C-alpha cells in the first residue's frame, strides 16, 4: 500500500522581509513515523517547522496535511486539524501551574470536550503531571519543563507532534527519558513525530528518517541508518575538507 | 612573531566552565577561525580577550603586554577591537556617527573622526548610508557598520563574532570578500564562524572548541577531519 504521506511539504519559500531563509524546501512524514530535521545553525530548521504549524506564512509552496492543503490556514486551525507544535525552549507560562499549562493545550474544539480523559491518559504516561500538578512551571527543571511542554502539545490530541529541539540544554539522563517518551508517544499513541535536533547522531538514533537542511535547502533525506553512514552529512556540517 | 597570546584562560559561571585552560598564540598577520558546536565557549573566549569578562585563571597578552584586567575600552585602545554576534549599533545615531565613536578612541578632533568614519564606510561599502539612522539598516548592512566601527578604532587584532550569522545568503560572498581584503591589508583576525564553508575558505588556521576546551588547532583540512571535531559535531558514528 502506498498511501499519501500524512504531511507533505513541497517547494517552500519563506522569507522575513527581504531576507529569504527557505528555498524550495520539501519534506514528508508518513503516519506513525519519527522524522528528524537536521542542519547546521541558521540552516532554517525552526523556520521550516514554524511554517508547517502556521506561525509563518510561506511566500510560495504547499503544505498538505492528510491530503488537505493547509498553508493558508491560521495556526489555531492547524492545531485543530491535528498538528501540535512544541516550541523551542518549551515556552511554558512560567507563573501558571503545571496543571493549567497542560490544560491550555486542549483549547481546540476537537480536543476540549475530551480534555479530562486525555489528561488522565497523559498522567499515566507522565506521572510528573500528577505529582507536580500545583507547582508553578518556572520552578521545574529543564527536563521537567520539556515533559510538561510535550504534554501540553499532546492535550490537543494531535496526529502529528512537532518538537523544536526537545533535548536542548538537558542533562544526559533527561535526554534518555525524553527520547523514551517520544518513542512511547509514537508506539503507544500512534502519533507521528517531527523534531528538530542539533546533535546529529542522537537525533538519528531516535528517528526513523532524517531530513537535512543546508542554507535553507533540503539537500538530503533518508533512513537514519543510511544518514548515519553518509559522507554527505559530514560535508554539510564540517565542510568539504572533512571528506 | 607572536602578536596575541592566550594562556590558560579559564572562565566559570557557577558550575559551568565555559572556557577551560584555553591556550594559543596568534602571529601577526594570521587569520584564525574559531569553530565549535553551540555552547562550546567561543563567544566567552572573545569576552575574555576583549576585557568584557575577567577570566578566573590565565591571561591574555598583546605583544608581551598583559591585557587581562583592563577594561574593554582600554583593551580597545591597546589595539584589540571586536564585533558582536548580537548587533549593537547606537540606534539613535547616524551610521557615520556610529563609526565616529570608534574613531574617537584615536583622535579628539571631530573633523578628523568624521573623515576617518567616511573612509571606513567607503571601505566596507556603506558610504551611501552615512547619513541614515543605524536602526534603518538591514542585518547585512548592520554587520558592515559593526565592522567599520571596530576598524575605526585602529585595531591590530580584530575579533569578528559571526560575521555571516543571520545574514541573507546573497550577502555572504561580499562579507567574505571584505574579510579577505582586511587580512590582505595586514590585519590580524580571529573569526568565530558557524558557516563551515566560509571559515574553511578564509582561515589559514582553525581552532576548534568543544565544551570549553581546545580540541584541535591547525590547518582547516586537518581540523575538520580530526576525530575529536567530527565527534563533537556529529557523534561517534561518523568517526572513521
Image (cartoon, rainbow, N blue to C red):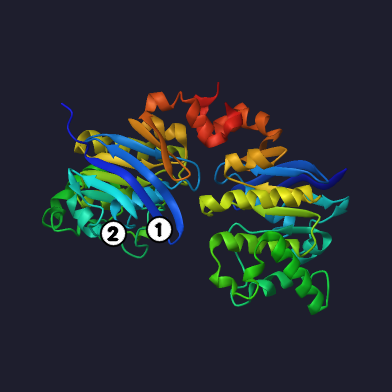
- The answer to whether residue A132 of the structure is visible from this angle is yes
Instruction: Check the image and report above or below for A164 versus B83.
Output: above
Q: Quadrant of residue A191?
A: top left
Looking at the rendered structure, the secondary structure element under dot 2 is helix
Instruction: Check the image and report above or below for A206 versus B109.
Output: above
Q: Position of residue B55 (x, y in %)?
A: 72, 53
Give the CA separation, mark 1 to mark 2.
13 Å
Dividing the image into 4 quarters, which one contains the C terminus of chain A?
A: top right
Between B91 and A14, the one nearer to me in the picture:
A14
The residue positioned farthest toward the front in the image shown: B128
User: Which residue is disc 1 drawn over?
Assistant: A139
Q: Position of residue A78 (x, y in %)?
A: 22, 54
Query: With B154 as the anchor, is B169 left or right in this view?
Result: left
The label shown at residue B191 is none
User: Which residue is disc 2 drawn over?
Assistant: A101
Numbered label tally = 2
Q: Position of residue B194 (x, y in %)?
A: 58, 45
User: Quick one: label 1, few (<14), some, or many (20+) residues within 10 Å?
Assistant: few
Residue in view at x 63 percent, y 59 percent: B84
Query: With B162 as the anchor, is B61 left or right in this view?
Result: right
Residue in view at x 47 percent, y 47 percent: A169
Q: Quadrant of residue B201?
A: top right
User: Quick one: label 2, few (<14), some, or many (20+) residues within 10 Å?
Assistant: many
Looking at the rendered structure, the secondary structure element under dot 1 is helix
* Chain on which label 2 sits: A
* Chain on which label 1 sits: A
Amino acid at each position: 500500500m502506498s498511501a499519501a504521506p500524512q504531511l507533505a511539504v513541497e517547494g517552500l519559500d519563506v522569507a522575513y522581509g527581504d531576507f529569504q531563509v527557505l528555498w524550495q524546501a520539501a519534506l514528508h512524514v508518513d503516519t506513525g513515523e519519527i522524522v528528524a530535521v537536521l542542519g547546521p545553525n541558521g540552516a532554517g530548521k525552526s523556520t521550516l517547522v514554524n511554517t508547517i504549524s502556521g506561525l509563518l506564512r510561506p511566500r510560495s509552496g504547499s503544505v498538505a496535511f492528510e491530503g488537505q492543503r493547509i498553508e493558508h490556514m491560521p495556526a489555531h486551525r492547524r492545531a485543530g486539524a491535528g498538528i501540535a507544535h512544541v516550541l523551542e525552549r518549551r515556552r511554558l507560562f512560567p507563573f501558571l501551574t503545571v496543571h493549567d499549562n497542560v490544560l491550555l493545550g486542549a483549547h481546540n474544539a476537537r480536543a476540549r470536550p475530551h480534555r479530562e480523559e486525555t489528561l488522565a491518559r497523559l498522567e499515566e504516561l507522565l506521572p510528573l503531571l500528577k505529582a507536580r500538578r500545583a507547582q508553578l512551571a518556572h520552578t521545574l527543571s529543564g527536563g521537567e519543563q520539556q515533559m510538561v511542554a510535550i504534554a501540553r502539545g499532546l492535550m490537543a490530541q494531535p496526529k502529528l507532534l512537532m518538537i523544536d529541539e526537545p533535548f536542548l540544554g538537558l542533562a544526559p539522563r533527561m535526554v534518555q527519558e525524553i527520547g523514551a517518551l517520544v518513542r512511547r508517544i509514537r508506539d503507544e499513541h500512534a502519533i507521528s513525530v517531527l523534531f528538530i535536533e542539533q546533535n546529529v547522531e542522537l537525533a538519528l538514533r531516535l528517528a526513523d528518517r532524517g531530513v537535512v537542511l543546508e542554507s535553507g535547502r533540503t539537500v538530503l533525506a533518508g533512513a537514519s541508518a543510511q544518514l548515519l553512514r553518509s559522507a554527505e552529512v559530514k560535508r554539510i556540517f564540517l565542510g568539504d575538507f572533512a571528506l | 612573531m607572536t602578536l596575541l597570546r592566550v594562556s590558560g584562560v579559564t572562565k566559570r559561571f557557577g558550575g559551568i566552565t565555559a572556557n577551560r585552560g584555553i591556550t594559543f598564540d596568534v602571529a601577526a598577520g594570521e587569520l584564525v577561525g574559531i569553530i565549535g558546536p553551540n555552547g562550546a565557549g567561543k563567544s566567552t573566549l572573545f569576552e575574555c580577550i576583549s576585557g568584557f569578562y575577567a577570566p578566573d585563571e590565565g591571561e591574555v597578552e598583546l605583544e608581551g603586554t598583559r591585557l587581562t584586567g583592563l577594561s574593554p575600552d582600554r583593551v580597545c585602545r591597546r589595539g584589540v577591537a571586536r564585533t558582536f554576534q548580537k548587533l549593537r549599533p547606537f540606534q539613535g545615531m547616524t551610521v557615520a556617527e556610529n563609526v565616529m565613536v570608534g574613531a574617537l578612541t584615536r583622535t579628539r578632533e571631530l573633523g578628523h573622526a568624521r573623515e576617518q568614519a567616511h573612509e571606513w564606510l567607503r571601505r566596507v561599502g556603506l558610504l551611501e548610508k552615512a547619513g541614515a539612522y543605524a536602526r534603518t539598516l538591514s542585518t547585512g548592512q548592520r554587520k558592515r557598520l559593526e565592522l567599520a566601527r571596530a576598524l575605526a578604532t585602529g585595531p591590530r587584532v580584530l575579533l569578528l563574532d559571526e560575521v555571516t550569522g543571520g545574514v541573507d545568503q546573497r550577502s555572504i560572498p561580499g562579507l567574505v570578500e571584505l574579510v579577505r581584503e582586511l587580512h590582505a591589508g595586514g590585519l590580524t583576525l580571529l573569526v568565530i564562524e558557524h558557516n563551515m564553508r566560509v571559515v574553511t575558505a578564509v582561515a589559514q588556521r582553525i581552532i576548534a572548541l568543544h565544551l570549553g576546551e581546545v580540541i584541535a588547532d591547525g590547518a582547516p583540512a586537518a581540523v575538520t577531519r580530526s576525530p575529536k571535531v567530527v565527534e563533537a559535531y556529529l557523534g561517534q558514528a561518523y568517526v572513521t
